[in-house]
Image: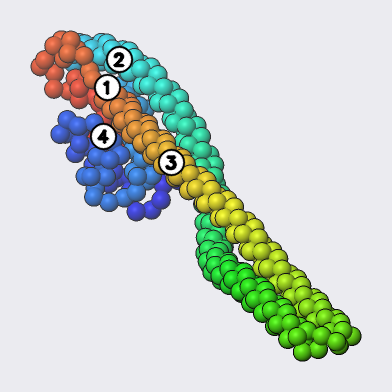
């Protein structure tokens, strides 16, 4: 049902105005003449006007004219109507073919649009997953970089500690050598003193052999005690040296482990950057395909609109053959006047 607003009489007056200008009536042209109204309402009124025109074409011409002229007019009218119907049938057949082709193209365009929408949805989902993975990888990369910074700091600390331990080890070795030299010198000096004392005692107390033996035993015991003390100090120094070497070895192992983890972190970061570049390239290709599908869909829609416009022109521009006009040049009320007349508005 037509909605209220634009009435049928308004549409009919607009159609008459277009026919007087020699233009075929259409929804767009009628609305341009009226300046208002919805396309649905105007289309329903235009369909009603066409139905009435088809019904009025079969009405007999008005009475009061001569019978011969009336027969001639009827013959010309039937011939013109047959020619017009034949041309109209041809135009309708051609228009129906174009409409069918347009419908097929529209269906294909809709299918392509649906495929494009599905691909676009899949690409959007894939892009979302890719962005999520990229964010996860970026977070992982940031964490790895933070760990790398921590490892670098620990590596610097370990290197400093290693340098300090190596310096301590060198100092301990020098101290050990110095103490060994001092101990050896002290023993040599003590032995020299004992020898000197023994010589003096021998000169003074050649007869006191027992005392000499006691002095020798005392000197021997003192020497053994000194040698034992020196051996203990040497063992302590060797234990400290071994501990320092063990610490240096542990520091070197920790440094090698940190370097290995640092290389693994750098490799993971390189892989993440490669994946990121690959995903960005895939995203650009997907966006280009989406744009191409949208352009193709717009082209299909434009072609469909052009075909609809051609269909309207073919349906409502049914020309009367020139031969019919030449047979009745002096008849002002001939077939050309028997078309949509003022009586259609009754």
The residue mark sitting in front, 4 or 3, is 3
The residue identified by callout 4 is 25
Q: Residues within 10 Å of mark 1 (few under 14, many from 20)?
A: some
Identify the residue under disc 2.
87
Q: Which residue is drawn at the image coordinates 16% and 34% (left, top)?
A: 20
Answer left or right for 91 relative to 161: left
Q: Disc 4 vs disc 2: Cβ atoms closer than 8 Å?
A: no
Q: Is residue 189 above or below residue 136?
A: below
Residue 151: image location, x then y, percent: 56, 63
Residues under labels 1 and 3: Cα distance? 57 Å
Image marks 4 and 1: residues in contact by CB distance under 8 Å: no
Q: Position of residue 249 (x, y in %)?
A: 66, 60
Asked if marks 4 and 3 touch (Cβ < 8 Å), the reply is no
Q: What is the C-alpha distance between the residues marked 1 and 2?
A: 7 Å
Tell me which label, 4 or 1, sits earlier in the chain: 4
> Pointer 3: what residue?
281
Which residue appears farthest toward the right when viewing the image? 210
Whether tag 2 and tag 3 are in contact, CB under 8 A, the answer is no
Instruction: Give the residue at mark 1.
Output: 318
Determine the CA span between mark 4 and mark 1: 12 Å
């Amino acid at each position: 049902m037509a909605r209220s607003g634009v009435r049928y009489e308004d549409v009919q007056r607009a159609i008459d105005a277009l026919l007087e200008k020699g233009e075929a009536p259409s929804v767009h042209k009628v609305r341009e003449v009226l300046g208002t109204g919805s396309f649905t309402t105007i289309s329903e009124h235009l369909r009603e006007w066409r139905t009435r025109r088809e019904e009025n074409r079969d009405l007999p011409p008005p009475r009061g004219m001569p019978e011969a002229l009336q027969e001639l007019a009827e013959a010309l009218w039937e011939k013109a109507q047959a020619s017009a119907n034949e041309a109209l049938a041809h135009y309708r057949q051609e228009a129906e073919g174009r409409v069918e082709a347009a419908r097929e193209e529209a269906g294909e365009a809709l299918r392509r649009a649906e495929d494009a929408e599905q691909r676009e949805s899949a690409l959007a989902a894939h892009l979302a997953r890719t962005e999520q993975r990229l964010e996860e990888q970026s977070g992982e990369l940031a964490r790895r970089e933070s760990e790398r910074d921590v490892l670098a700091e620990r590596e610097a600390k370990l290197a400093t500690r290693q340098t300090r331990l190596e310096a301590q080890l060198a100092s301990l070795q020098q101290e050990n050598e110095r103490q060994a030299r001092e101990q050896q010198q002290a023993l040599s000096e003590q032995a020299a003193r004992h020898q000197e004392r023994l010589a003096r005692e021998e000169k003074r107390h050649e007869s006191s052999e027992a005392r000499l033996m006691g002095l020798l035993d005392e000197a021997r015991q003192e020497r053994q005690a000194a040698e034992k003390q020196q051996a203990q100090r040497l063992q302590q120094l060797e234990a400290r040296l071994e501990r320092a070497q063990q610490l240096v070895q542990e520091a070197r192992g920790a440094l090698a482990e940190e370097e290995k983890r640092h290389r693994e972190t750098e490799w993971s970061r390189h892989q993440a950057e490669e994946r990121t570049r690959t995903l960005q390239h895939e995203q650009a290709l997907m966006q280009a395909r989406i744009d191409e599908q949208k352009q193709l869909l717009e082209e299909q829609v434009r072609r469909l609109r052009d075909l609809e416009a051609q269909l309207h022109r073919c349906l409502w521009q049914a020309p009367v053959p020139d031969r019919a006009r030449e047979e009745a040049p002096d008849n002002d009320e001939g077939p050309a006047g028997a078309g949509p007349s003022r009586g259609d508005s009754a």
